[in-house]
Amino acid sequence: MVQGEADVNAMTSEPQSILLTGGAGFIGSHIAIEVARGGHRPVLYDNLCNSKSSVIDRLAGIIGRPVAFVRGDIRDGDLIRKVLREHRIACVIHLAGLKAVGESVQKPLEYWDNNVVGTLRMLEAMNDCGVHSLVFSSSATVYGEPRQLPITESHPLSATSPYGQTKLAIEHMLRDLSVSDPRWHICLLRYFNPVGAHESGLIGEDPNGIPNNLMPFVLRVAAGQFKELGVWGGDYPTPDGTGVRDYIHVVDLAAGHVAAMRKLDTMRCEAINLGTGRGSSVLEVVKAFEKVNGVKVPFTIRDRRPGDVTSCYADPSVALHRLGWKTQRSLEDMCRDAWRWQQSPAARGN
Ligand code: NAD
Ligand code: WQD
């Protein structure tokens, strides 16, 4: 620590500056709004490898004041140190990372370098600057193949892809760190399936190329960019034969981060699920989307996608008890807000 630098760990109700690594991305941009709504100043740090700088102006429009943005990589420890000091950061919400499961199988070293080495460099910088409060974007992927449902935080951990391995490795690194130094306060938020968009329609998920995930693909089919949705498997042991997931509205997810930040003082290193607790099948998503938006989503049942699990949904009771947080928005809200975003000029790169 630099001489004279106090530990800036404790969250108070005073306005504080919160660093959002990966803040220009899908989830980070929604968290920026909730951080501002909670009375704090979001500072976005992103290398824009999977996002666009135009989101910053749109965020400023929603929040009603300029938003601090630094273009940088989490592997650049010196730049992070500079930002932590100049902005007097009290807490880091660490979202920056690569997240495509299939790509991680093709490019494992890129994923280990970006996600794990990047997190290591960032933690060193935080330590040097006396910032010890961290909320980390983990994932339900750390549970591997579900052994019992709903999934609680004590479910055994495993990974089925290099992407999942990086999340698991980072969780282990953070646990080791918290054991080594009681000044650290860390929350590992394990997200289930974030979808939807801010109700303004100004920000949302904007994947490059052909989307891998269900909701972005449904949106492109509804918009006429693809003829039909391929439903990956119709013979799972679920009520309608299609895979079941816990879809969570991204604005609810974002609010969970502010709730976690408020309780960080009471945590050493704690894992918490962020989900609704309700599983929806692929066909339920398609039907809900068609109903609330009045558009057709043609689909064909195809073979199962390798690596997919049958069902995955959260037990979100720890989030309720520890954070006082639960989801407010329905599957219909997720479909309506996602479609509003898809139809906005911003979603078409304008
Ligand atoms: P996203 O790709 O939209 O956002 C990630 C952001 O991080 C992007 O803006 C990207 O440019 C930035 N980034 C990546 N590597 C960086 C680096 N080295 N330095 C600086 N910036 C970098 O993804 P998202 O959906 O918003 O996900 C955010 C986090 O949540 C990720 O860590 C992801 O693994 C995790 N997560 C996402 C999901 C999901 O389904 N979207 C589920 C569980 C966990
Ligand atoms: C949902 C359901 C598919 C596309 C992935 C990652 C996970 C997490 C979130 C980050 C499944 C079906 C999908 C399509 C379909 N990310 N589907 N046709 O696989 O639960 O999770 O994203 O941590 O790690 O693995 O989400 O949206 O890809 O799939 O039928 O074109 O939709 O088979 O049942 P998944 P998904």
Image (cartoon, rainbow, N blue to C red):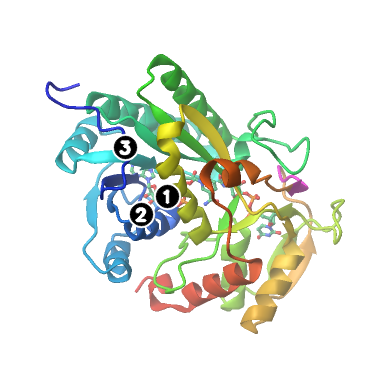
Viewer-nearest residue: 85 or 335: 85
Residue where numbered disc 2 is placed:
35
Identify the mark nearer the N-term, 2 or 3.
2
- The answer to which quarter of the image holds residue 68 is bottom left
Q: Amino acid at mark 3?
A: Ile
Q: Amino acid at mark 2?
A: Val
Residue range of the region highlighted in magenta in the rendering? 307-311
Q: What percent of the width, then of the height, locates residue 305? A: 72, 50
Q: Is mark 1 within 8 Å of ligand 1?
A: no
35 on left or right of 234:
left
Name the mark nearer the viewer: 3 or 1.
1
- Element under label 3? loop
Viewer-nearest residue: 208 or 132: 132
- Residue beneath the point at 37% across and 17% down: 181
48 is higher (above) or lower (below) than 175: below
Q: Amino acid at mark 1?
A: Val
Residue where numbered disc 3 is placed:
74
Identify the mark nearer the N-term, 3 or 1.
3
Q: What percent of the width, then of the height, locates residue 307? A: 71, 42
Does the residue at mark 2 contact the one at mark 1 (Cβ under 8 Å)? yes
- Element under label 1? helix
138 is higher (above) or lower (below) than 169: below
Q: Which mark is residue 258?
A: 1
Q: Is mark 3 within 8 Å of ligand 1?
A: yes
Please indicate, yes or no, whether residue 121 appears anywhere in the rendered image: yes
User: Quarter of the image containing the N terminus?
Assistant: top left
**Residue neighbourhood size for the residue with mark 3, other residues' Cα within 10 Å, grouped as few (<14), some (14–19), many (≥20):** many
- Element under label 2? helix
